[in-house]
Image (spheres, helix red, strand yellow):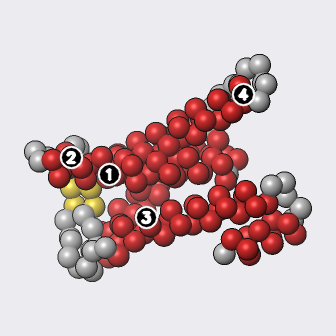
Amino acid sequence: MVSFTFAYKVYKREKYPLQSSAIWTLFLCYWLVLIQTAFFSRESGSRKQISLILFETWGHSVQAHAYFIENIFMFIPFGILAPVLFKRMKKMYWCVLAGFLMSCTIEISQLLTQRGYMQIDDVLTNTAGAMAGWLIWMNITVRQSRQSGVARATCPD
């Protein structure tokens, strides 16, 4: 996969084709792990519930708290990688909106395939994860621009 992407980038005469290919491969691997976690780690037909109660998944146990926090961590890579790969995602609004829409897609797909509970909390926490990832990406970008001699880095938002 990396070699195909690299060859395509060289053919298109892009700057830094190996770096770009590695990031695309990392993004693909992230999505494969996300799909595995959200769908294929559960038996089909095993979950049929919908929860539209906000913060219901926070619960009263350490395990419930861990699931809540896990959903935030699950979308941080999206918030970091999306702005690197897509120009429009450099704006916080678009990156967070894309994270929100992807989370909604996952939740609706879980409902239809009955491979996960459709929960509003998951959409909220996944969206928060995408925002946290974008903030991490922005922090790294600003630090790199300052280190490279740019007098002042501006937020692309």
Question: Upstream in the sequence, badge 3 or badge 2?
Answer: 3
Q: Secondary structure at mark 3?
A: helix
Q: What residue is shown with label 2?
A: 65
Quadrant of residue 16 within the rendered picture: bottom right
Q: Which mark is residue 34?
A: 3
Residue 6 position within the rendered picture, expressed as x and y whole percent measured from the top left: 77, 68
CA gap, disc 1 and disc 4: 33 Å
CA gap, disc 3 and disc 2: 20 Å
107 left or right, relative to 99:
left
Question: Upstream in the sequence, badge 3 or badge 4?
Answer: 3
Q: Amino acid at mark 2?
A: His
* Mark 2 burial class by Cα count in 10 Å: few <14, some 14-19, many 20+: few
Q: Secondary structure at mark 2?
A: helix
* Mark 4 burial class by Cα count in 10 Å: few <14, some 14-19, many 20+: few
Kindly tell me whether residue 152 is visible in this rendering: yes
Q: Amino acid at mark 4?
A: Gln
Residue 46 position within the rendered picture, expressed as x and y whole percent measured from the top left: 20, 76
The label nearer to you, 1 versus 4, is 4
Q: Amino acid at mark 3?
A: Leu
Q: What residue is shown with label 1?
A: 70
Q: Looking at the image, do the residues carrying marks 3 and 1 touch, with CB atoms under 8 Å apart?
A: no
Kindly tell me whether residue 96 is visible in this rendering: no
Question: Upstream in the sequence, badge 3 or badge 1?
Answer: 3
Question: Upstream in the sequence, badge 1 or badge 2?
Answer: 2
